[in-house]
Image (spheres, rainbow, N blue to C red):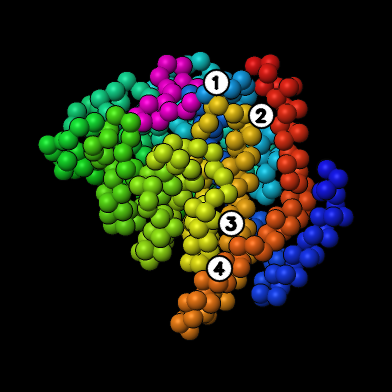
């Protein structure tokens, strides 16, 4: 711990911040208790650049690309879990992990994706039990010969479509079993890269196919205390710039009609769209939402999440909707140009800081001014709240959670890099 972050100075700064927030009616002790309840789902693909562990097929495609060749990429389940261990040790609170189907461990045996079973994720389950973390899950509808046409669940080739239907069905079975075994719902998100580079003549036809596939996949009903089905839209992808089958409108319509959780990815909309504005409109009709927290520097570029205005606005809207118990937070970025553990920790801590800022917001004061028609006061208060000492509250949270305060965690990552990552 640095000389500026001794336990004494952290507590002194926190006592000051506590008084400042109390003047606005905010109990910081209660906020820190609430923050402990908030879980972020850390995505495995940041640790290995979306390669997975398949014997044959695998890797990124369908508009997905991780750039950079920083040393130390995880090459096996053992290495990826070790990296997870290090990252989780530097992040305050208790969190989850998020797996794609291509992270199955088959001991060198070739297992097609439509033949996957729970046993192929046994090492992940045993590790999660030991760590006391939940697992979320995703079918992998890319990086495979059967996805080479650019279509999977929306394909007009029945053999292709049927293969991906079987794959997602077994993934749902696996996810439900994971949720039951770990005692926490497994959120399984379905995303497909289907689309066309140029203008299609039959937009409706492919969407009919996707709807047909989803209807077949969701035919079997699982208890929501074990499995939460989610569906993710996309604006466009590399190679499918003109048409995406699973558009926002398609996903919203299908999700609301069929009680499937809608997944909003921060990079899957036009850069001028305000994703925070979408939450209240959707939560009026849907019992929950899944957020994929990313940073779209140039559309869906999936940069490491930082504490920017967009991230804060998203968390504030969740708070203002009183929806933290209805919204699942999951990370979705991949950067192979920097230390991958640094990326995980930076992104997760940023997401948690945004949630803390939202929880500390004296929302009742803002709503009171708004309801009284005092819009100038509302604006002025919003500006004043931006400079309240949330950083002192964050440092106290890190201290209480027994993780490094401030930038001290970089020392741990550097030591791990020298001892482990450079030897891979």
Q: Nearer the viewer, residue 255 or 46?
A: 46
**CA separation in Å, label 4 and label 1:** 42 Å
Single out the residue that lies furthest toward the bottom.
Answer: 372
Q: Quadrant of residue 247?
A: top left
* N-term mark: 2 or 4: 2
Res. 241 visible in picture: yes
- For disc 3, the neighbor class at 10 Å (few under 14, some 14 to 19, many from 20) is many
* N-term mark: 4 or 3: 3
- Residue 327's spot in the image, x, y percent? 49, 56
* N-term mark: 1 or 2: 1
**CA separation in Å, label 1 and label 2:** 19 Å
* N-term mark: 3 or 1: 1
Res. 183 visible in picture: no
Q: How many marks?
A: 4
Q: Which residue corresponds to mark 3?
A: 355
Q: Please state which of the two labelled residues, at mark 2 or mark 4, is closer to the viewer.
A: 4
Contact, CB < 8 Å: mark 4 with mark 1?
no
Contact, CB < 8 Å: mark 3 with mark 2?
no
Q: Please state which of the two labelled residues, at mark 4 or mark 3, is closer to the viewer.
A: 4
Q: Please state which of the two labelled residues, at mark 4 or mark 1, is closer to the viewer.
A: 4
Q: Which residue corresponds to mark 2?
A: 82
Residue 69's disc number? 1
Helix, strand or loop for disc 4:
helix
Q: Which residues are magenta?
A: 53-67
């Amino acid at each position: 711990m640095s000389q500026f972050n001794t336990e004494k100075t952290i507590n002194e700064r926190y006592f000051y911040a506590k008084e400042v927030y109390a003047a606005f009616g905010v109990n910081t002790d209660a906020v820190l208790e609430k923050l402990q309840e908030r879980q972020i789902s850390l995505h495995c693909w940041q640790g290995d650049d979306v390669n997975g562990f398949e014997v044959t097929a695998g890797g990124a495609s369908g508009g997905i690309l991780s750039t950079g060749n920083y040393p130390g990429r995880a090459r096996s389940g053992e290495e990826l879990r070790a990296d997870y261990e290090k990252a989780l040790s530097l992040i305050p609170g208790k969190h989850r992990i998020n797996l794609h189907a291509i992270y199955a461990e088959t001991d060198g045996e070739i297992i097609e994706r439509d033949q996957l079973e729970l046993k192929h994720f046994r090492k992940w389950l045993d590790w999660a039990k030991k760590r006391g973390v939940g697992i979320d899950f995703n079918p992998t509808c890319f990086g495979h010969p059967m996805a080479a046409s650019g279509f999977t669940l929306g394909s007009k080739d029945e053999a292709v479509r049927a293969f991906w239907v079987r794959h997602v069905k077994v993934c749902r079975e696996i996810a439900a079993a994971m949720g039951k075994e770990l005692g926490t719902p497994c959120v399984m998100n379905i995303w497909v890269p289907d689309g066309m580079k140029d203008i299609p003549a039959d937009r409706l036809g492919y969407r009919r196919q996707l709807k047909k596939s989803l209807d077949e996949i969701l035919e079997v009903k699982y208890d929501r205390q074990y499995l939460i089905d989610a569906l993710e839209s996309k604006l466009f992808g590399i190679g499918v710039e003109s048409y995406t089958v699973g558009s926002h409108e398609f996903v919203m319509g299908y999700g609301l009609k069929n009680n499937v959780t809608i997944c909003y990815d921060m990079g899957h909309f036009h850069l001028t769209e305000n994703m925070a504005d979408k939450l209240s409109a959707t939560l009026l009709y849907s019992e929950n939402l899944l957020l994929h927290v990313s940073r779209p520097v140039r559309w869906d570029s999936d940069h490491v999440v930082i504490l920017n205005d967009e991230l804060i606005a998203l968390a504030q809207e969740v708070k203002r909707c009183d929806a933290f118990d209805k919204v699942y937070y999951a990370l979705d970025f991949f950067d192979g140009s920097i230390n991958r553990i640094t990326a995980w920790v930076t992104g997760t801590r940023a997401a948690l800081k945004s949630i803390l800022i939202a929880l500390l917001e004296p929302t009742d004061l803002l709503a009171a001014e708004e309801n009284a028609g005092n819009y100038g006061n509302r604006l002025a208060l919003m500006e004043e709240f931006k400079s309240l000492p949330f950083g002192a509250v964050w440092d106290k949270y890190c201290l209480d959670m027994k993780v490094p305060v401030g930038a001290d965690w970089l020392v741990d990552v550097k030591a791990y890099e020298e001892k482990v990552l450079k030897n891979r």
